[in-house]
Structure formats: structure tokens, C-alpha cells
Amino acid sequence: MKFPRRSFLRMLILAPAVRLVLSSLGLTALASWLWLRVETLAQPSQPSYRRGGRIQLPMPELSGVITLEQALASRRSIREYRSEPITVRELAQLLWSAYGITETRWGFKTTPSAGATYPLEIYAVVRNVEGLEPGAYRYLPHSHELEQTRAGELNQELYSAALEQEWVLKAQLNIVITAVYSRTTRRYGERGVRYVFMEAGHACQNVYLQATALGLGAVAIGAFNDDEIARIVGAGEEEHAIYMIALGRPVKQYRITLEELSSYYTARRLTSS
Ligand SMILES: Cc1cc2nc3c(=O)[nH]c(=O)nc-3n(C[C@H](O)[C@H](O)[C@H](O)COP(=O)(O)O)c2cc1C
């Protein structure tokens, strides 16, 4: 059930007064319950909680601790992860970076999309995320929520479908990108297929950069059995698996210095004499 924003605001304003009245009537338990309820609703950054079968994600952060240039320079495919879990807040940020809303009139997203046809669907295959049970979840970009499509640990299945790549098995989280080609080919014909692939590349790069900014490690995965991956995440009939990203806390972070970069370029420049 959706909670209308205006009702919520009214409740937030009225709640202290109602609490006071209830307490003075000796109904302290009811007053405390009401207060707890309002506080919970006022905390969208809490770990996930369910309403109507969906899991609401913490609101995305719109600022971070490193610059775009630092994220670009430090992005590397990382295939070795430590055992610590990923937080729900990090998961929410990664999914938002992949395909989240950035414009509220038309619902445009972080990723450019040919004709704004948005053919992609994004799944989180969770193995080790704090506060979230293992399973596959579809990301719902317009409400920034998750909907579980399969329960249980699925990394072993993903690993088999991805040609037994070790990092897929060990990842705390795998993000799977599927596409409904017809959303784009309906408008652009066969050329729409390449637009879909381009868009998946944009989404993947967003995740790489966001992961880098969060101090996480990511690697793009293209080698897998498409039908198997689509089945594992519980994708719909029309969806085709096209890309995957394995993620975890890196054993080692990648850094390059400006000195290393300048000597690389300098050694390759033509000298004037
Ligand atoms: C389309 C695509 C598919 C890829 N598939 C895989 C894959 O299946 N397994 C893997 O370990 N890395 C995969 N990679 C990652 C590349 O190996 C990696 O980007 C490349 O070695 C360059 O390293 P860098 O990402 O650290 O710059 C893929 C990258 C792209 C762009």
C-alpha cells in the first residue's frame, strides 16, 4: 500500500500532540506505538522493510566522497572480495546508479535510453547483504523498491551458468541486466537491438563507477548462458539476459597516481627533435 505524502506530513505534525493526549489519558502503550510508527516512516534510510510484499530501499545519496575524476581513475575490474557483507544502503545506491530515476516529470533515468524506451530490467541476486535474505530481487526504478522473484542462495547456480567464474560464486551481490528488446525495436526496428546493448553498457559503467565511489569492487560479466541466467533470476518470458556485474568488498583497491600517468604519456609522446 502506498502512503500519500500529504497524509504522512500531516501525521508527522499531529503525532506529538496526539501522543501527548494519549499519554495523559493513560494510554501510554498506544502513544509509544504511534510514535514508533511515525519515526519508522520518517526514516527512509533504515534498512529495508516490507509493505505489500515489496521492499523499500533507502533513498539514494546525491553526493559522495570522491570526485568523478577519482572514480574514473580508480575504476578497475575487481575479482577478489573479502567476506564482509554489503549494506542495504550500498545496494540501494548501486541499483539507483544502474537505472534509478533522475527526473520526475517523465521518469528519466541515470542511464541514457534511445527514445527513452527503457528496455532494461535490473535484478539484484543477493548472497550477503545486511538485512536482506538471499534471493533474486527485481529493482522497481519508479518506487525505488525491490520485489523478490526467487528465494534462497543462487550464487552456485549463477556460477554454473557463468562458465564457473570464481568471482560470480564469491560475490556478495550479482547484478543482472535483462532486456525486453521489443520496447526499443517497436520504435527503431532491428537497429533497436544495438541501442539496447549500448544502454546496458551505460548502466554497467554507472555501476562500476558507483561501486568505485563506495569503495566496492565490481567486474562486468558477459560470458554466460543467457537462458540459464534469465531463469535463475526469475525473469519474465519477454526478457533476455544480456549483462551481469559481480560485486563485493575488494581485497585490494586500485589506485593510480598522476605521476604514473604522466610518465606513461610522456614515454609515448613524440619528442620534438
Ligand atoms: C562486454 C564485457 C564483457 C566482459 N565479460 C567478462 C567476463 O565474463 N568475466 C570477467 O572476468 N571479466 C569480464 N569483463 C571484464 C574485462 O575483462 C575487463 O574490463 C578488462 O580486462 C579490462 O580491465 P578493467 O575493467 O580493469 O579496465 C568484461 C568486460 C566487458 C566490457
Image (spheres, rainbow, N blue to C red):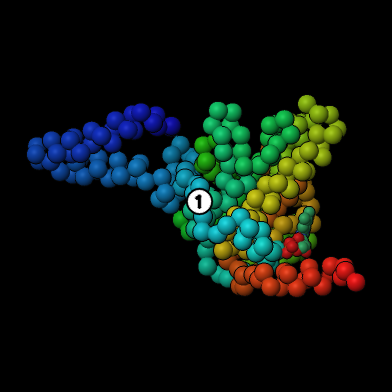
Report the front residue among 156 and 209: 209
Name the element at disc 1. Answer: loop
Q: Which amino acid type is shown beneath numbered disc 1? A: Ser
Q: In this view of the protein, can residue 262 be seen by the observer? A: yes
Look at the picture and state if 130 lies above or below 235: below
Residue occupying the point 72% across, 57% down: 220
* Residue 6 image position (x, y, % from top left): 35, 28
Choose top left, top right, bottom left or bottom right for residue 215: bottom right
Left-right relation of 253 to 183: left
* Residue 77 image position (x, y, % from top left): 70, 63
Identify the image quadrant of the C terminus: bottom right
Q: In this view of the protein, can residue 152 be seen by the observer? A: no
Left-right relation of 1 to 113: left
State the residue position of label 1.
Answer: 63
Choose top left, top right, bottom left or bottom right for residue 214: bottom right
Quarter of the displayed picture in which ligand 1 can be seen: bottom right
Look at the picture and state if 17 lies above or below 244: above
* Residue 244 image position (x, y, % from top left): 70, 53
Report the front residue among 210 and 265: 265
Residue occupying the point 30% across, 41% down: 38
Residue occupying the point 37% across, 46% down: 43
* Residue 240 image position (x, y, % from top left): 75, 42
Identify the image quadrant of the N terminus: top left
Left-right relation of 43 to 233: left
Report the front residue among 126 and 232: 126
Number of numbered discs on residues? 1
